[in-house]
Amino acid sequence: MNIVLLFPDDFIRDTNRVRLKGRRLQHVRNVLRASVGDSLCVGVAGGNIGEAVITLFNDEALEMEVKADCPPIPPLPVTIVLALPRPKVMRRVLVSMTTMGVKRIILVNAYRVEKSYWQSPLLGTDELDKNIIAGLEQARDTIFPEIIMRPLFKPFAEDELPGIIEGSLPLIAHPEAGEACPRDVRQSVTLAVGPEGGFISYEIEKLLACGFKAVHIGDRILRVETAIPVLLSKLF
């Protein structure tokens, strides 16, 4: 945790003071080893970042005086269209994407996505938020990504995707592509990443018909949780 993320319910009414319990209190005590008078980096969820001075600290609660007057880190100008991974992989990928500053994630179905993945408890709001918060705390960020779920590939690709990619550079991560992933792109990007085993030919054709270009990142076949950070580091 490189930032203590604060939420509206944490604030003591009509003040700039917060009162924290539970996980964040334990982290400040056991990991940060802070005490009364110390300053911590804090951020208001959806808002500014800044510092907070600890004014009270005991077994029951932590209270701090907050001054958050700096804007959060700028996001990456990218939308990721991601074939829904296995739940355990999804957890790691979501933390990673959030840490790197991705603010729009569209989870889609694909032929090689198991139907059971869409029933995973991980896709519930509370579980998604838990992993997003972990990514924000790591990156010292406060802005939650937008997560959109589209369990029907064909209508999504035909009806919605053309509008989504408008004004951006649309790329498919595809190991059999003839062109390498571009570097240091100076525009917004829509990046499509397939499931384990990749998109099937039909899905690739649908994406190409929308205007996507297939690109590769080398000879090695990477796992989704590795490929996405590699792609983002090349692109931006």
Image (cartoon, grey):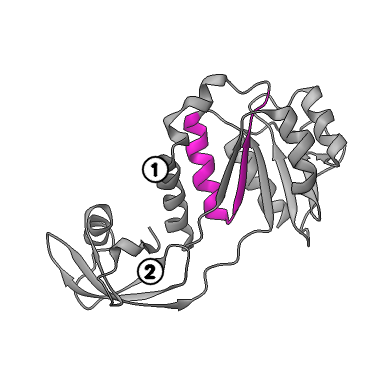
Q: Please state which of residues 203 and 24 is positioned toward the viewer in this rendering.
A: 203
Three-letter amino acid code at disc 1?
Answer: Asp
Position of residue 111 relative to residue 168, above or below, is above
Is 99 a magenta residue? Answer: yes
Residue 121 visible in the shown view: yes
* Position of residue 226 measured from the top left corner of the image (x, y, whole percent): 60, 40
In the picture provided, is 174 more to the left or to the right than 26? right
Q: Residues within 10 Å of mark 2 (few under 14, many from 20)?
A: many
SS class of the residue under badge 2?
strand
Residue drawn at x 17%, y 62% is 61
* Position of residue 103 measured from the top left corner of the image (x, y, whole percent): 59, 54
Q: Which residues are magenta?
A: 87-110
* Position of residue 6 measured from the top left corner of the image (x, y, whole percent): 36, 63
In the picture provided, is 78 more to the left or to the right than 138? right
The label on residue 42 is 2
For marks 1 and 2, the one nearer the N-term is 2
Mark 1 lies on residue: 126
Q: Residues within 10 Å of mark 1 (few under 14, many from 20)?
A: few
Three-letter amino acid code at disc 2?
Answer: Val
Position of residue 33 relative to residue 66, above or below, is above
Of all residues, the one furthest to the left in this rendering is: 59
